[in-house]
Amino acid sequence: MKNIVILISGGGSNMAAIVRAAQSEQWPARIAAVISNRADAGGLPFAQANGIPTVVIPSQDFASRDAFDAALRAAIDEFLPDLIVLAGFMRILTAPFVAHYAGRMLNIHPSLLPRFSGLHTHRQALAAGHDRHGATVHIVTAELDHGPVLGQVEVAVLPGDTEAALAIRVLQQEHILYPRVIRDFIEHGAPAQH
């Protein structure tokens, strides 16, 4: 049985989708903990209601990114993780932190990478006039939103789309894509990189 630690900063809808899939599909893994950098993260009550240990490490309590990442790493490692899943975790992680979990930390990003790394991806897609947008699951590397891609899903950009409407449709597809990629990763490991 493999241990998954999920990191969140907000509502945790992707985390909830992962938890539900792990339970209903009886993955050979368990969600060992949900850790947040915000005490008011909306996903924490869901995790607690599902019997998942939660930890809060308020990022504003630390003087530097290095200090926060050291505390976060210590908290994660208590749960002996085989996989770390970023699910709306709104922190840029330091290179030493990423290196510690090399090859076993995943993120989902709301764009078809390599398009639109960083924030406001839906706004960027609309401004660029693209007719396709979507989401990407990738292995986390020190370069923001540039790790090896494990899965993508496309969403049509509709005439008259707003940033909010597009965001909702992409998020709905994230809830399908992310659990599928995580289960595949747990069962088969990372694909060979070429």
Image: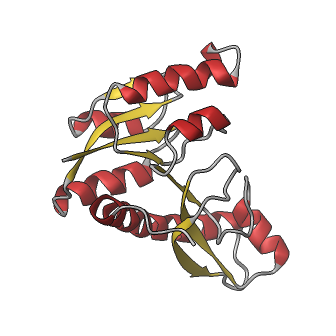
- Residue 66: name its quadrant: top right
Q: Nearer the viewer, residue 84 or 38?
A: 84
Residue at image position (71%, 85%) is 131
Residue shown at 64%/72% (left/top)? 112
Judge whether residue 92 can be spotted in this image: yes
Q: Is residue 141 above or below residue 124?
A: above
Q: Is residue 117 above or below residue 141?
A: below
Quarter of the figure with residue 163: bottom right
Image x and y of residue 63, in percent = 70, 14
Question: Which residue is painted at 83% across and 75% down in the image?
Answer: 128
User: Which residue occupies the foreground of this view, 187 or 54?
Assistant: 187
In the visual, does 70 lie left or right of 45?
Answer: right
Q: Residue at x 33, y 67 (%)?
A: 184
Residue 39 appears anywhere in the view: no
Q: Quadrant of the C terminus?
A: bottom right
Residue 47 position within the rendered picture, expressed as x and y whole percent measured from the top left: 31, 38
- Rendering coords of residue 109 (x, y %): 59, 59
